[in-house]
Amino acid sequence: MKLLVTGGAGFIGSNFIHYWLKQHPEDNIVNLDVLSYAGNLENHASIEGNKHYRFVKGDITDKEVVFPLVEDADIVVHFAAETHVDRSILDPAVFVRTNVMGTQVLLEAVKEYGTRFHHVSTDEVFGALGPNDPPFNEDTKYDPRSPYSASKAGADHLVRAYYHTYGIPMTISNCSNNYGPYMFPEKMMPLFISNLLEDKKVPVYGDGLQVRDWIHVDDHARGVDFILQKGTIGETYYLGGNAEKKNIDIVKLLLTYLGKDESYIEYVKDRPGHDRRYAIDFSKATRELGWKPEVAFEQGLKEMVEWYVANQEWVARCKSGDYQAYYDEWYNKTLKK
Ligand code: NAD
Ligand code: TYD
């Protein structure tokens, strides 16, 4: 089988490729990635020379690159995206370009060649839950509230529109917050781990009582595998980690793992439009595919911390270049009290 993975140099795409080559060593993978600030070929050092893996540097909005690769693939697994909510607040345009327009270019190619298409999406398209609301489920309406989630919602709608209108063979997964190795240190967990390792404070937005459901990235990769093997064309599956946590409780765990006290917490201004709570009901994936998350949260988090401790040079390289300029702008415009 030939897979075209888009965005395979990012956090989840890298982990997915490692997972896939381990589970399906005879398959061939082409990784199409533009190598934005979040894409990093170092993530694939361990598979360098593997004859089943090939990297192509290119942009998913570029038809000339996308069409021949889709024609040559049996399955497209679409991870490529702009993914950081904070960056989408500073600069929404690139989110629309990549997440909406890039997805549409892929869909045109899929329509042309009839290639199986799996679209990787997020639970953030459903907006925010109140403390006593049931988790997002099949009846939940789309209600995206950040430029990031609106662009992902736009892509989801396009994928479904291409299914209903042109009959493309597609599936979608909406997944909760991922954690694990190779996560770019701008997202909460790796930012906080790396700050603590650098003896810096961690910027907690607002009161820190926001809730996310956390899934280990290996469970997400396995979930996509189950959908590709057993999912029904035209269907959407939700994937979650069964681990609803308040941000502040995660911060406290990280402080404990890294031997720091609460003086390392800096409460900053809240993110504009900050969604209060996400939680997802993944019972359809269990019922129809036999999938459920397997990594226990505290164990997975501990292993993630160990990975970041062992890979501080990788983190330092991520935080070099344009990163500091982005972060200073974000901090000074938005977070500083
Ligand atoms: P990431 O930001 O770590 O990686 C994104 C990758 O896409 C990078 O390698 C980047 O270079 C590449 N890319 C960006 N623009 C591109 C373009 N125009 N053409 C080709 N490649 C491009 O993101 P991630 O966290 O790995 O997320 C992967 C996917 O999973 C995204 O679609 C995201 O919406 C979805 N998702 C993420 C989470 C999460 O917690 N991180 C949760 C649910 C769903
Ligand atoms: P993030 O990792 O950006 O993921 P998302 O917003 O897509 O869920 O943030 C996770 C949670 O952590 C979210 O509630 C925002 C919060 N957060 C902070 O409190 N401080 C930070 O510096 C960051 C990046 C996030």
Image (tube, rainbow, N blue to C red):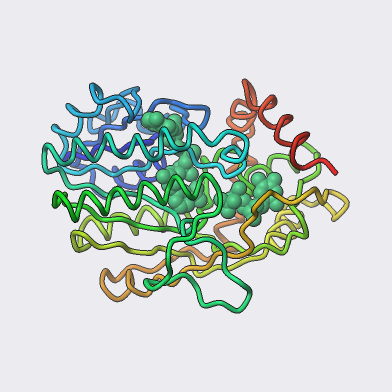
Q: Residue furthest right?
A: 263
Quadrant of the snapshot with the C terminus: top right
Question: Can residue 10 be seen in this snapshot?
Answer: no
Q: Residue at x 64, y 23 (%)?
A: 320
Q: Estimate the x, y position of residue 227 in percent, counting from the top left.
A: 26, 59
Q: Residue at x 32, y 43 (%)?
A: 78
Q: Nearer the viewer, residue 112 or 288?
A: 112
Quadrant of the snapshot with the N terminus: top left
323 relative to 290 in the view: left or right: right
* Image vertical order of residue 258 relative to residue 293, above or below: above
Q: Estimate the x, y position of residue 4 in percent, counting from the top left.
A: 25, 37
Q: Estimate the x, y position of residue 87 in percent, counting from the top left.
A: 59, 37
Question: Can residue 194 be seen in this snapshot?
Answer: yes
- Residue 137, picture quadrant: bottom left
How many marks the image carries: the answer is: 0
Q: Nearer the viewer, residue 84 or 41?
A: 84
- Residue 88, picture quadrant: top right
* Image vertical order of residue 97 relative to residue 168, above or below: above
Q: Residue at x 64, y 34 (%)?
A: 312
Give ligand 1's quarter of the image. Answer: top left
Q: Estimate the x, y position of residue 20 in percent, counting from the top left.
A: 30, 46
294 relative to 315 in the view: left or right: left
Q: Residue at x 11, y 43 (%)?
A: 114
